[in-house]
Image: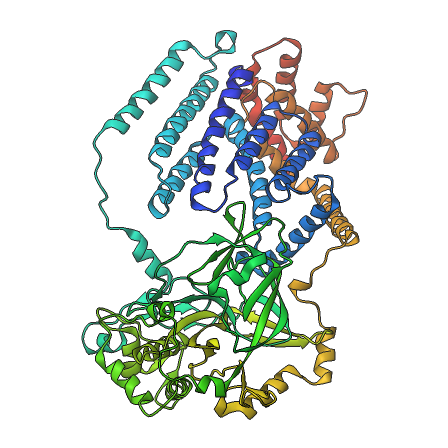
Amino acid sequence: MQQAKSHTFSLLLYLLGFLLLWEWLRPLSVITNNGSVNYFVGFAAFSFLLTYLRLPYWLTFPVKFIAIVYALHLLFFYNTSFFSGLWVDYFFEDLRENLIFVFDGNWVGLTDLFRSFIFFILLWIISYLMRYWLLQARRIFLFFFVTIIYLTILDTFTMYHADLAIVRTMIIGLVLLGLLRVIKIQEKEKVSFKRKKLPLSWMLALVVMVALTSAVGYAAPKFGPQWPDPVPFIQKAANGYEEYGSGQKDAKTGGAVQQKIGYDSDDTHLGGGFSMDDTPIFYTSGEYTHYWRVTSKNFYTGKGWINKPEGKPQKVDLSHLSDYPILNLYESGTEVKKSTDTIEYLGRNFPQLIYGGSLTGIKALNQKNADLQLNENSGLFEPTYHGRHISLKSYTLEYQYPTFSIPKLSRVKGTANDPEVIKSTYLQLPTSLPARVRNLAQELTGNETNRYDKVQAIVNYLQGSDYTYQIDDVAKPSGNTDYVDQFLFDTKVGYCDNFSSSMVVLLRTVGIPARWVKGFTQGTYKETLSDSKYEYEVKNSDAHSWVEVYFPGSGWVPFEPTKSFDNINSFNYASDTEDSQTTSTPEKTQDQQEQQEKQQQPEKQEQKTAEAKTTTPKDFHLSLGTVWKVLALIVLLLLIASFILWRSRKKWLPGYLLRQYSGRTDDHALDQAFRKLLYLLQLYGYKKRPEQTLREYAERVDRHLGTKDMGRLVTKYEERSYYKADPHQWSDCKESWENIIKKLRG
């Protein structure tokens, strides 16, 4: 086909194909946190250009790979020299770790660096497919149709507005379909155009039709949405939402939501059961065991928790953490010890920073130039990189570990010493709170004379026999039902959110400032490290919520009201002048200490066994020698695969050639197909002797195969070669060529 060989015409097809692909990339800046879409667009354009130039693979392959590596350097390591080996080592370490995640099915653990690398590879593949779709198969409708579906889904379920994108895509797609249809008609009817150009009348008709249909479609009146918003329904279906029937049963349970346990930033509607998820999230190592804080919330709505005011994240000055009141948990009357903890995430899928105690420093962030944003109303840390939210891999915390004096806590009576800012923020309750909640709090604390005893009375009540800890079939309040009231008086079944929320509300009703805190428990003990620190593994199932109560002179003191959980914080029973003797909560002091010592000091034989086991994913360290071993293994596998393909080529090559030339209609198809057939005949033992002419060779092949197809094919080939016959003779002899291959394949 003469027109297809026109560089100008091919360039037009490639340009339209690139514009169609661009519509896939435009929404990324809206639906993701990726602010660097231009890098992907630039690489896609570069790949299309190299594909259009039809340079040899041995040149385009390394050029495109270098372009990907350079783009990744600009995205993630721009402060490091491109020729530095440090970022290359990091890249290969990250690649190896993510490949393990892929084989383990841990898709959420994949890092941004690896995702970007895979996306560049995908764009590379698409640039090759575009060449096949546009210049060989002459089919683009499927990609065009999928693009329309893609845009409509994004317009429905995301913040991306695809109004103009749909119009652009329709115009580009219709023009492409029209041009490819014209080419097919020209090939089928064997029409030759002068100067290898499409007639102006054809082009004009195509442009007018596309412009007319686009204008009518854009200007015509359109129906509004005919269905209600499908997003809430789909979200409920995805979460396994199931409403109970009306009547007494509904009033009692309020419905149930089967969720998967783990940290969730949305606490506006608490309740509903969940299933366990023991996926590990991070490892911690430190001298002391404590809960891991993510955020706290101050405003109870009757259904859940929010922060008022909500607050906006601000960049943190890490050298002045003491300037942030939300981080200063303890006051001067609390005995504290300085300590450090190290946190290492198993997958970069947790975009918040966890911490324990009263923070004094954050160091060793694994990503250079990363900033930390702090919400000063909730204490929530979020790492960012040039304005984009990221997930850290590791960091080190410096903090103060407290020991609370029970005699000192017991001396707090009344609310006279509570600062006004504390009382105005942490005594809030909804006006709709049922009176029986207040009456219960008065009943529980009425005989106590100090704040500590009042708090402990509520803890003991919630951990008593009247309440049951359960994670499945847990009520979710509906209508005007209060979340805490439903748990305290109706269901009496729930998990940490039920117990902790109830304790905060009960304390506030008697004038004791308290707040709701969420994060993770200490996790599961793994081993004792050489520096006398304990290593713990924290999983999704360790997500937890607890209570902090304000004591003047001591600060915010953590309490654990959830049944089957113990308060692992350090309390001192001695008077202020006596030597410290630390334990846990009053009732469980000796038992908890023995249990903790038993947990933290496993048998020596178990330690030896644990040390002999394979390291966990967090221990990956990739040396340059390991990189070469991995590369050598990949090369070896490729060589083995190539050898197997070469040895079995008689089985797969005939079918491959039949598929390769089934849609060919260009003027070079006959020459190339004939040469491939000669190679295939030689492979099957029909080698042409030097003294034989093509006709003699064809007679021998036909005699062995029992056909006359080889003779007819040679005749057409000679006419094509010597007499400049019709270049489209391939369609006349294609059947003979296929018959010979099918005979060889048997």
Q: Relative to the observer, which residue lies in front, 171 or 511?
A: 511
Identify the coloring: rainbow
Residue 281 visible in image: no
Residue at 32% across / 88% down in the picture?
A: 444
Q: Is residue 423 left or right of residue 711?
A: left
Marks counted in the figure total: 0
Q: Residue at the spot x=74%, y=48% of the render?
A: 631
In the displayed structure, would residue 230 be above or below residue 17?
below
Q: Position of residue 249 (x, y in %)?
A: 23, 77
Which residue is outermost to the left?
A: 247
Relative to 610, does residue 236 appear above or below in the rendering?
Answer: above
Q: Residue at x 67, y 34 (%)?
A: 61
- Can I make out residue 70 in this image? yes
**Residue 641 location (% of width, % of height):** 71, 47
**Relative to the observer, which residue lies in front, 744 or 472?**
472
Q: Position of residue 516 (x, y in %)?
A: 40, 71
Q: Quadrant of the C terminus?
A: top right
Give the farthest residue toward the right: 691
Task: Spot the residue most to the top.
Answer: 194
Front residue of 570/294: it is 570
Is 592 located above or below residue 120 in the figure?
Answer: below
In the visual, does 302 lie left or right of 335?
A: left
Q: Is residue 662 above or below residue 472?
A: above
- Residue 348 place in picture, x, y as percent: 56, 57
